Image (spheres, grey):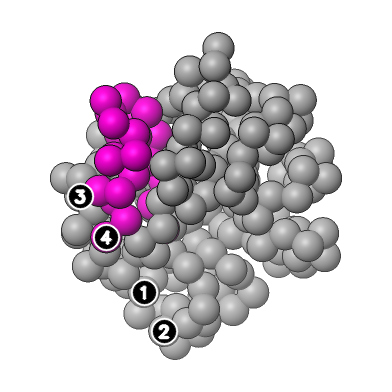
């Protein structure tokens, strides 16, 4: 299991220190949540701060867009060379076009599904993706409770990807901890995002290791 700590729960007064700490602790990716105050009722950070994160990070960035104008934000963050850019299918009229654009910029494309969006939405697009992100909370805030229905959904997506694109990774974001990591692994999940569990833990390296099962 790969682990991507979400810097949403980091101490923003000591951001570079916290980013270095999770990278030194052996995380696989650094998850960066971009919220625009429109698609979700919260506002986070722009390219100036993400560029500081990229400078401090020794692991690749995983940018999760929760925004209305995906193309604008893809162009804004592409120069920072993240490994992944994820966008919500609920907010994109032309997902296939955006996937091609992200790939043409040398970045791996990922589509995000809200808790109520069915995986069958991806039937004709899964073959074009490097990763699918299943939200296990409603997007917008850290520290929320894990929504259990993501488990059967991940199992269903796991069957779909075996048929359509075995290389495509399955990522889950929201409320992940040592309490649900074994069920996520069993459901076929490859990558988990964990914000509050990692950053509120007294030993962050131990928290990361407890998810790398
Ligand atoms: O995308 C997100 C929220 O929209 C965050 O990545 C997610 O909430 C992580 O935080 P936590 O692990 O505390 O739930
Ligand atoms: Co996220």
Residue at 43% of width from left, 64% of height from top?
170
Of tags 1 and 4, which is closer to the observer?
Answer: 4
Helix, strand or loop for disc 3: loop
Marks 1/4: CA–CA distance: 18 Å
Residue at 70% of width from left, 28% of height from top?
52
Of tags 2 and 4, which is closer to the observer?
Answer: 4
Whether residue 95 is visible here, answered yes or no, is no
Marks 3/1: CA–CA distance: 17 Å
Residue at 26% of width from left, 34% of height from top?
145
Marking on residue 180: 3
**Viewer-closest of 87 and 58:** 58
- Contact between marks 1 and 2 (CB within 8 A): the answer is yes
Position in image of residue 165 (x %, y %): 52, 81
State which region is magenta.
Answer: 191-213
**Nearest to N terminus: mark 3 or mark 2:** 2
- Is the CB of mark 3 within 8 Å of ligand 1? no
Q: Please say whether residue 18 is one of the residues in the magenta stretch.
A: no
**Nearest to N terminus: mark 3 or mark 1:** 1
Quadrant of the snapshot with the N terminus: bottom left
Marking on residue 93: none
| Tag 4 residue | 213
Extreme residue in the bottom direction: 163
Marks 1/2: CA–CA distance: 6 Å
Extreme residue in the top direction: 13
Helix, strand or loop for disc 4: loop
């Amino acid at each position: 299991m790969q682990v991507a700590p979400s810097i949403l729960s980091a101490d923003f007064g000591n951001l570079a220190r916290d980013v270095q700490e999770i990278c030194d602790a052996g995380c696989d990716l650094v998850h960066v949540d971009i919220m625009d105050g429109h698609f979700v009722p919260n506002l986070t950070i722009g390219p100036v701060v993400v560029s500081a994160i990229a400078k401090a990070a020794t692991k690749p960035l995983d940018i999760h867009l929760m925004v209305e104008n995906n193309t604008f934000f893809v162009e804004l963050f592409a120069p920072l060379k993240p490994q992944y850019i994820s966008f919500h299918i609920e907010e994109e009229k032309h997902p296939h076009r955006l996937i091609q654009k992200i790939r043409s910029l040398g970045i791996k494309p990922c589509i995000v599904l809200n808790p109520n969006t069915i995986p069958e939405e991806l039937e004709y697009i899964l073959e074009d993706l490097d990763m699918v992100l299943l939200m296990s909370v409603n997007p917008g805030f850290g520290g929320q409770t894990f929504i259990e229905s993501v488990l059967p959904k991940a199992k269903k997506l796991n069957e779909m990807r075996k048929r359509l694109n075995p290389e495509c990774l399955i990522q889950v974001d929201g409320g992940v901890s040592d309490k649900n990591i074994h069920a996520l692994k069993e459901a076929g999940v490859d990558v988990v995002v964990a914000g509050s569990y990692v950053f509120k833990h007294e030993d962050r390296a131990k928290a990361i290791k407890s998810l790398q099962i």
